[in-house]
Image (cartoon, helix red, strand yellow):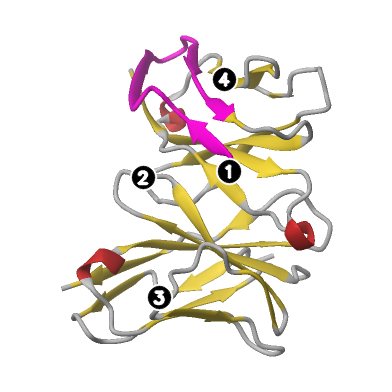
Amino acid sequence: AQTVTQSQPEMSVQEAETVTLSCTYDTSESDYYLFWYKQPPSRQMILVIRQEAYKQQNATENRFSVNFQKAAKSFSLKISDSQLGDAAMYFCAYRSYSNQGGSEKLVFGKGTKLTVNP
Amino acid sequence: NAGVMQNPRHLVRRRGQEARLRCSPMKGHSHVYWYRQLPEEGLKFMVYLQKENIIDESGMPKERFSAEFPKEGPSILRIQQVVRGDSAAYFCASSPRGANVLTFGAGSRLTVL
């Protein structure tokens, strides 16, 4: 079974600075998807960024980018120019490429709480 | 587009009562997922449904929990004879057929006294 590990329960960053959140995963599959989700205090789960394992190029979405190291099974999230609104729980998630019935079943890490200091 | 709608947002039940949580997927989405988030934990997959079919219920507890997604109306997650350990946030998510992205609702927080 796949597992996702986020080794940093909490992180903090100064506004306008850059922060990197770590995620490692364990799988025997070669094709899969990886995600970062943001959960602000409202509890709404918001997709931040997505990476397909077969793509070597790291995904980017505005101030958010990933460092995907497939051999190391590492998928870190970098947030540049941090803003107060970035404060939230961040969850790393794994999706098997060949889930039963095309399922979007995700395996989540335990999350990292990000604090942004003004 | 109203997004994924869950209700109630908050539900309080006493031990032994039943809890029913409802989820209306996004318009055009035919696949529904239920996840549970215990305090200080990530989300854990419970069940994946399509209209009138349970596709994957590998994450559902064997007893007291059931889910349905009828031809008409919302998906329902039902917990019978609730216990304190059922206290959690329950999230519903939906996707269209063939997509690789889930859209989550805001969750329903169940508190069992």
The residue indicated by pointer 4 is A76
Q: Amino acid at mark 3?
A: Pro
- Whether residue A7 appears in magenta in the rendering, the answer is yes
Please identify the quadrant where the C terminus of chain B is shown.
Answer: bottom left
Q: Of discs 3 and 1, which sits in the foreground?
A: 1
Q: Observer-nearest residue: A116 or A53?
A: A53
The residue that mark 1 highlights is A1
- In the structure shown, which secondary structural element does the residue marked by tag 1 occupy? loop
Taking A113 as reference, is B100 above or below it?
A: below
**Residue A99 image position (x, y, % from top left):** 73, 53
Which amino acid, mark 1? Ala
* SS type, badge 3: loop
Determine contact: label 2, label 4, CB under 8 Å: no
The picture places residue B68, in percent across and down from the top left corner, at 59, 82
Q: Chain of mark 1?
A: A
| Spatial CA span between label 4 and label 1 | 21 Å
Relative vertical location of residue B32 with respect to residue A81 in this rendering, above or below: below
The residue segment tinted magenta is A1-25
Graded by Cα atoms within 10 Å as few (under 14), some (14 to 19) or many (20 or more), the crowding at tag 3 reads some
Please report the residue visible at 80 percent of the width from the left and 53 percent of the height from the top: B99
> With respect to residue A60, does B18 lie above or below?
below
Q: Which residue is mark 2?
A: B41
Mark 1 nearby-residue class (10 Å; few <14, some 14–19, many ≥20): few
Three-letter amino acid code at the position of disc 2? Glu
Question: Chain letter of disc 4?
Answer: A
Give the CA separation, mark 2 to mark 1: 18 Å
Indicate which disc, 4 or 1, sits on the residue closer to the N terminus: 1
